Image (cartoon, rainbow, N blue to C red):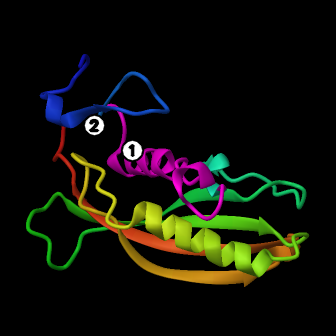
Amino acid sequence: PQGRCASIASCWMTVSSPRWCCLAEMPIPWAILEMVQTRLRTVRKANDFRTDAGRDVRLEPAPFDPNDAVRLTLYPLTTLHPDDARSAGERGYTFVVEALVPVRLDNAQQRIVETIADIEDALDSFVQAPLALPLQFQESVLLDRPDGVAAMAAQLLFGTRYRREQGR
């Protein structure tokens, strides 16, 4: 590892970025989202999942076309200092995985339920070591045609904890 890293424990390589990523360069919540994105990209029938929802996994929102395939988008939600924190730098972090399934499909409800199950299976206790504790599923909500979009949507809330370094 190069740059401002104090140790190898604070650096890692990702599939999406074939260079060393260091905590000194990237905020931990964003690094967690990138690791989750990489993990969700494995959601393919070829990998024994029910769906191919991992074909389109995004970190930024974009308009949805009903002719598109299933799309997953990750959204950061909250960062907080937990009441039971063991240090000043401990943080609780939650994010949303939003799945959009076109309603033009005859089995849109079945597909959204299968997609939810695949997301949960892929992220169940996923550890983004050395960054954070295993992910914990918190809840999911189904939406039919959100904002008039011709899609069924599911929003899955996940949480984790991490410890940030204090000051510079």
Residue in the image at 51% along x and 49% along y? 37
- Spatial separation of the CA atoms under disc 1 and disc 2: 8 Å
Residue in the image at 34% along x and 31% along y? 25
Q: Residue 56 in magenta?
A: no
- Stretch in magenta: 23-52
Q: Position of residue 116 (x, y in %)?
A: 58, 73
Q: Position of residue 152 (x, y in %)?
A: 77, 75
Task: Tell me the residue that label 1 is attached to.
Answer: 31
Q: Which amino acid type corresponds to the residue marked 1 in the rendered image?
A: Ala
Estimate how packed mark 1 is, as few (under 14), some (14 to 19) or many (20 or more) residues with alpha carbons within 10 Å: some
The answer to whether marks 1 and 2 mark residues whose Cβ atoms lie closer than 8 Å is yes
Location of residue 69 by image quarter: bottom right
37 left or right, relative to 69: left
- Please say if 154 is above or below 79: below
Q: Which amino acid type corresponds to the residue marked 2 in the rendered image?
A: Leu
Estimate how packed mark 2 is, as few (under 14), some (14 to 19) or many (20 or more) residues with alpha carbons within 10 Å: some
79 left or right, relative to 140: left
Q: Residue 46 in magenta?
A: yes
Front-most of residues 151 and 119: 119
Please say whether residue 153 is visible from this viewpoint: no
Quadrant housing the C terminus:
top left
Location of residue 26 by image quarter: top left
Residue in the image at 63% along x and 73% along y? 114
> Which disc is residue 62 wearing?
none
Task: Tell me the residue that label 2 is attached to.
Answer: 23
Secondary structure under the numbered disc 1 in the rendered image:
helix
Front-most of residues 69 and 161: 69
107 left or right, relative to 104: left
Location of residue 98 by image quarter: bottom right
Q: Residue farthest to the top?
A: 2
- Please say if 148 is above or below 19: below
Quadrant housing the N terminus:
top left
